[in-house]
Amino acid sequence: ERSLEMVVGLLGIMKAGGAYVPLDPSYPAQRLAYMLEDSAPVALLTQAAVRGDLPAPKLPVVVLELQDAASMIAREAAHNPDTSALGLTASNLAYVIYTSGSTGLPKGVMVEHASVVNFLSAMARAPGVSVQDVLLAVTTLSFDIAGLELYLPLMSGARLVLASRQSAVDAEALSQLIEQHGVTIMQATPATWRLLLDHGWQGRADLRVLCGGEALPTELSARLAARGGTLWNLYGPTETTIWSTMARVNGLHTTAIASIGRPIANTQIYILDPRGQPVPIGVRGEIHIGGVGVARGYLNRAELSAQRFVPDEFSAEQTARMYQTGDLGRWLPDGNIEYLGRNDFQVKIRGFRIELGEIEARLTACDGVRQAVVVAREDSSGDKRLVAYLTVQQGVELSAAQLRSQLSTVLPEYMVPSGFVTLQTLPLTPNGKLDRKALPAPDHSSVVSAEYQAPVGEVETAIARIWQTVLGLPRIGRHDNFFELGGHSLLAVQLLSRLREQFGVEVALREVFAQPTLQGVAQAVLRASRSAQPALLPVDRSEP
Ligand code: AMP
């Protein structure tokens, strides 16, 4: 959670010479337990409100609260340890951030202070930051780009405004925050910018719009350029520290997506052919990134690190390394880079980086599943959705609901497929390889398992109307599943804020994930109203 306490916590960890590992309390306990075991931290820093969502490791737990934070700042302000006397250098670790791993477990990227400082100094020059600026931070701490939001203002004397987790995915709340605080810099993924625009956000002439994490399509850049002050497309993997290239975009580009621009300071981009030779201008190759931003490697994964972090033979420095991104691109004649997609099965969905192999490994481990393939398909609205294709063991029948609930115990919500299609056999190409192109589009029945039954009672009927608006669907049955119908976490947050408006109750996101049917959500509303103010709720005549 982004909060003042957590910012104080991060600064405290760094001041003490430690490195931090962000844990998202919304992740399944098993995934968090793995991250704790893998990174073996010396202490767990948390807050009372989320303490219960974290596994209980056998290590010292520090519960940070605002009061302590304030007194800690007061106490520590005058106390600046002599870093060199402590033996700390710029090559100490700043953080370890976990990202999806293709073999079934997430992997921790180790980033050093020198990389972060270089990155921040580059950003301070362009897009630029000054004491007059106000930056609105919307990104969760477990995404490395939060580093720009938290440290850039603090380094330069600009003002930092923290959006709560709820507001960060709520277009209305975000527009309000932008206006109320006179925000001049905001960084977000295309999904969040689209959310704002789709909700009628009017923009702000002096707002620097920083967009990154996923390709910036022309349609979006044109709309953004018309609403903000200046627009920047930022590109880079976690492995090379937040962003490695950037482009100022005017929204008038003729290509389908905006150019990712040129490398930032002390960063080299090499576009190489399969033999590791630079390709000529205009020819597609794999993007390799060298320079100060290159991470130390993956924690406890020497082999994988050696595969992806390779010697930089173009550098004069003996020990220089470069990161092999898996991204494809080509040089444009003007020195900018055009991004051309991936050469593997890593995808981005609503800004989240996902290795399809990680989901496949988890699916194959589910009871009764023989083989599994997961693809990211674009639906008619241009939204990408994960669809799983499986073959099952003889005599076994698996429902989408069963698979979804098993996967939810190990994968974060954004990695759980929305459709499950069972096939007799997986389609193969003539030379015996999986033929991804021949996988059938999921039909309604493979996505939605429920037969239609009308909502019962006032509460269900009222919630059905909310779903219709949020999901853009004409009819909702009481057994329909929010996520099967195309719902995802951003939409679920909209659902929660509408429930709050209409019923005056707080339903937790967790409850929607646990019981995602219309009936289930109605029950959550009833539970919440019982423990709050029953008088606010219309009388419920539905069966439980
Ligand atoms: P992450 O480590 O989560 O920052 O994800 C990094 C990956 O996201 C990159 O390797 C790209 O595939 C993709 N990516 C990030 N920014 C952009 C961008 N501006 N345009 C296209 N792809 C991007």
Image (spheres, rainbow, N blue to C red):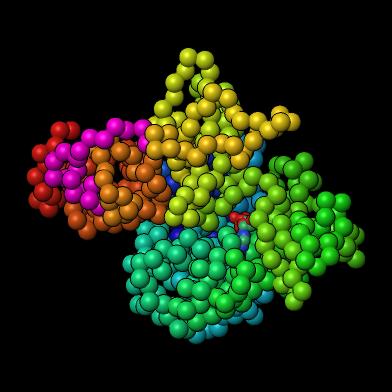
Which image quarter holds the C terminus?
Answer: top left
* 179 or 286, nearer to the observer: 286
Q: Can residue 87 be seen in this view?
A: no
Q: Is residue 58 left or right of residue 203?
A: right
* Ligand number 1: quarter of image: bottom right
- Residue 350 coordinates in the image, percent (x, y): 50, 55
Q: Is 144 colored magenta in this rendering?
A: no
* 368 or 373, nearer to the observer: 373
Residue at point 37%, 36% (across, down): 448
Q: In which quarter of the image is residue 284?
A: bottom right
Relative to 457, say whether 363 is above or below: above
Q: Residue furthest front?
A: 430
- Residue 496 coordinates in the image, percent (x, y): 30, 53
Q: Is 450 colored magenta in this rendering?
A: yes
Q: In which quarter of the image is residue 428?
A: top right
Span shown in magenta: 447-466
- Residue 224 coordinates in the image, percent (x, y): 48, 73
Q: Can residue 297 be seen in this view?
A: yes
Q: In this view, does 261 lie to the left or right of 280?
A: left
- Residue 472 coordinates in the image, percent (x, y): 32, 53
Residue at point 31%, 50% (across, down): 473
Q: Quadrant of residue 37?
A: top right
Residue at point 51%, 77% (across, down): 225
